Image (cartoon, rainbow, N blue to C red):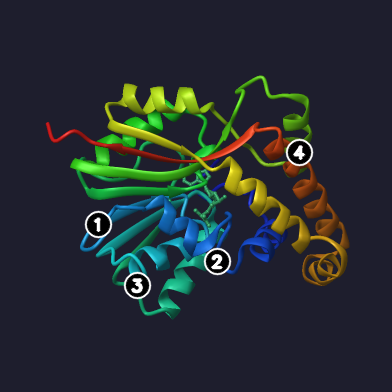
Amino acid sequence: MTNGGSHEYTEQFVAGLEWIWGEGFLSPGGPEEVAAILDGLDLGGAEVLDIGCGLGGVDLLLVRAHRAARVTGIDVERPLVDRAKRTVAAAGLTGRIDLLLVAPGPFPFADASFDVVFSKDSIVHIPDKAALYGEVLRVLRPGGVFAASDWLAGSGTPYSAPMRVWLDIVGITFDMETPENTAAALEAAGFVEVELRDRNDWYRRAVREELALVSGESLDRLAKVVGREAAEHRLASSTAKLEVVDRGELRPVHMRGRKPIR
Ligand SMILES: C[S@@+](CC[C@H](N)C(=O)[O-])C[C@H]1O[C@@H](n2cnc3c(N)ncnc32)[C@H](O)[C@@H]1O
């Protein structure tokens, strides 16, 4: 990637994701899922980093619904960051939500800059998890919390044949770890109170709702927005995803860890 950003989230791809997950969201579950990731964690007055902010829908929620004092969202896709900035400005929240286009790799922040690091379904795109978790730990204040969701692979790599079918259809870069390796990597980075909550059951139900949104008359309506080929592609992708989620190979999880006080 260059300073111009990565280019996997095309306009059509983004429109398809928003069709199934709602305006401003590039991942499933909307406000309820964000609340579930933050369950028991009070963001009141907190300075929060959001890794992979996408269109910024989550960042609006972190401020409005969860009372974060300030949110810094980072992403590698320029068009997404530009759109998110316009959304935040239109909401009158520019002073509380700062969005940055970054290059993959070390974060452009000083040590101990944030009370909470959040991420929703973005770490799946970052291959070097050990380096990432090390960076998350570095930018957290002592006692700070990492609260995220991510997509994991139940049986890891090499991926099974159905996983490869689904990933080929999706066509963007996913680097999925197992739940066991993820917990171990968080602990190896230095996190304590590491916890992973499996969301496979929830996502089995959610993918069926997704499929309904890209089938039948709904598919025809989506085709009017993104074109017939892209709409059919979305249907094929959701159909292949249903198989891997039902087989327990695609395992969305919520993850938590705390930076030790000393
Ligand atoms: C599935 S989307 C989720 C976006 C947002 N969190 C949401 O839930 O709507 C994944 C996001 O991660 C971003 N991303 C990919 N690699 C990244 C990296 N190395 N650093 C930060 N963001 C990255 C993508 O550009 C994309 O916006």
Image x and y of residue 12, in percent = 72, 60
Please give the residue where the numbered disc 2 appears in the rendered image: 24
Please give the residue where the numbered disc 1 appears in the rendered image: 47
Q: Is residue 105 visible?
A: no
Q: Is mark 1 within 8 Å of ligand 1?
A: no
Neighbour tally class for label 1: few under 14, some 14-19, many 20 plus, Cα within 10 Å:
some
Image x and y of residue 258, in percent = 26, 37
At a point 66% along the width and 58% down the height, the residue shown is: 17
At a point 35% along the width and 74% down the height, the residue shown is: 93
At a point 68% along the width and 39% down the height, the residue shown is: 245
Q: Is mark 2 within 8 Å of ligand 1?
A: yes
In the rendered view, does 206 fall on the left or right side of 122?
Answer: right
Neighbour tally class for label 3: few under 14, some 14-19, many 20 plus, Cα within 10 Å:
some
* Mark nearer the N terminus (2 vs 4): 2
Question: Which corner quadrant holds the N terminus?
Answer: top right
Q: Is mark 4 within 8 Å of ligand 1?
A: no
Helix, strand or loop at disc 3? Answer: loop
Spatial distance from mark 3 to mark 4, Cα to Cα?
41 Å
- Discs 4, 1 touching: Cβ within 8 Å: no
Report the amino acid beneath label 1: Glu
Spatial distance from mark 4 to mark 1, Cα to Cα?
39 Å
Helix, strand or loop at disc 1? Answer: strand
Spatial distance from mark 2 to mark 3, Cα to Cα?
16 Å
* Mark nearer the N terminus (2 vs 1): 2
Question: Which corner quadrant holds the C terminus?
Answer: top left
Image x and y of residue 133, in percent = 36, 32
